[in-house]
């Protein structure tokens, strides 16, 4: 009887040990999984922190540029003066509809092709990317239909990071992406066009704007000289 009781006790202890080992293994695997998830989460958080810092610096820089330009504009307006480069003086109120505005801007973008030479590439089309939503995409698509840049058909599309472009147009909605996109294409022969002259201070090539019933443009000659584009002198004479 005693031997049987002892055998039962030993069996129970053995079974308990097996269960404990199995439970320990499960707990160990769970801990390892949680640790991996924690490491992955920390990596994501660190990357987001870096991107957030970069974005904050960009916003601070843009805000500084805005304040500087605003103060400069007010000083010029009070003095009754207007500089020749860029639209730094007081502009006339807009007197054209959005449709007219973007039809005229589309005409300008196409006209720029006539004054600029891009290096020869293996591209099968002349690509224009639109950064941010903008009515100019439809206006420009309609305007350049069946037209060519040299021997290449012209293609207008929403900007895609993995594509190669000849022109990038930054709409008002796409201005926050300017610095990031510019840094990505800075070594490429790409004409950067914006709707805000402030961005000329950090590398945009051309700015389009409305002055009364007219659409005008300013050219950043310093930035264009540093690009891989060959720009006709006539181009600068057309800039306001």
Image (spheres, helix red, strand yellow):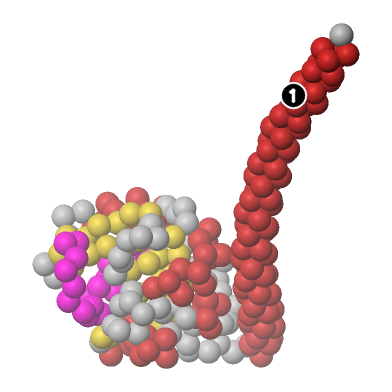
Q: Is residue 98 left or right of residue 19?
A: left
Task: Provide residue 200's location: percent of width, then percent of height.
Answer: 49, 80
Q: Is residue 216 visible?
A: no
Region of the chain picked out in magenta, as a range: 104-125
> Residue 182, located in which quarter of the rendered image?
bottom left
> Residue 4, located in which quarter of the rendered image?
top right
Residue at coordinates 53% horizontally, 58% vertically from top-left? 173
> Which is more toward the observer, 43 or 23?
23
Q: Quadrant of the C terminus?
A: bottom left
Q: Is residue 91 left or right of residue 235?
A: right
Residue matched to label 1: 15
Query: Is 53 in the magenta?
Result: no
> Which is more toward the observer, 25 or 52?
25
Q: Is residue 132 visible?
A: yes
Residue at coordinates 47% horizontally, 87% vertically from top-left? 85
Q: Residues within 10 Å of mark 1 (few under 14, many from 20)?
A: few
Instruction: Note whether 222 is above or below 38 in the view shown.
Output: below
Q: Quadrant of the N terminus?
A: top right
Task: Provide residue 63's location: percent of width, then percent of height.
Answer: 67, 74
Find numbered disc 1 in the image and state the secondary structure of the residue it sits on: helix
Residue at coordinates 65% horizontally, 44% vertically from top-left? 33
Residue at the far right: name it: 2
Residue at the far top: name it: 1
Instruction: Note whether 178 is above or below 221 in the view shown.
Output: above
Query: Is 118 in the magenta?
Result: yes
Task: Provide residue 144's location: percent of width, then percent of height.
Answer: 23, 58
Residue at coordinates 35% horizontally, 50% vertically from top-left? 138
Q: Is residue 178 left or right of residue 192?
A: right
């Amino acid at each position: 009887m005693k031997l049987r009781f002892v055998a039962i006790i030993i069996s129970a202890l053995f079974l308990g040990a097996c269960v404990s080992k199995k439970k320990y293994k499960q707990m160990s695997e769970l801990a390892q999984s949680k640790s991996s998830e924690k490491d992955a989460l920390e990596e994501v958080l660190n990357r987001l922190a870096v991107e957030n810092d970069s974005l904050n610096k960009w916003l601070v820089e843009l805000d500084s540029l805005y304040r500087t330009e605003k103060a400069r504009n007010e000083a010029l307006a009070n003095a009754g003066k207007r500089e020749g480069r860029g639209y730094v003086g007081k502009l006339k109120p807009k007197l054209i509809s959005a449709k007219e505005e973007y039809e005229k801007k589309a005409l300008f973008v196409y006209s720029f092709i006539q004054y600029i030479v891009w290096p020869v590439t293996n591209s099968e089309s002349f690509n224009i990317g639109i950064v941010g939503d903008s009515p100019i995409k439809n206006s420009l698509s309609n305007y350049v239909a069946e037209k060519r840049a040299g021997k290449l058909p012209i293609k207008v599309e929403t900007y895609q990071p993995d594509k190669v472009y000849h022109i990038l147009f930054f709409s008002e909605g796409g201005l926050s992406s300017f610095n990031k996109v510019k840094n990505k294409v800075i070594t490429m022969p790409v004409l950067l066009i914006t709707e805000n002259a402030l961005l000329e201070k950090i590398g945009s090539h051309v700015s389009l704007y409305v002055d009364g019933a007219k659409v005008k443009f300013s050219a950043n000659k310093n930035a264009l000289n540093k690009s891989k584009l060959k720009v006709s002198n006539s181009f600068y004479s057309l800039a306001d």
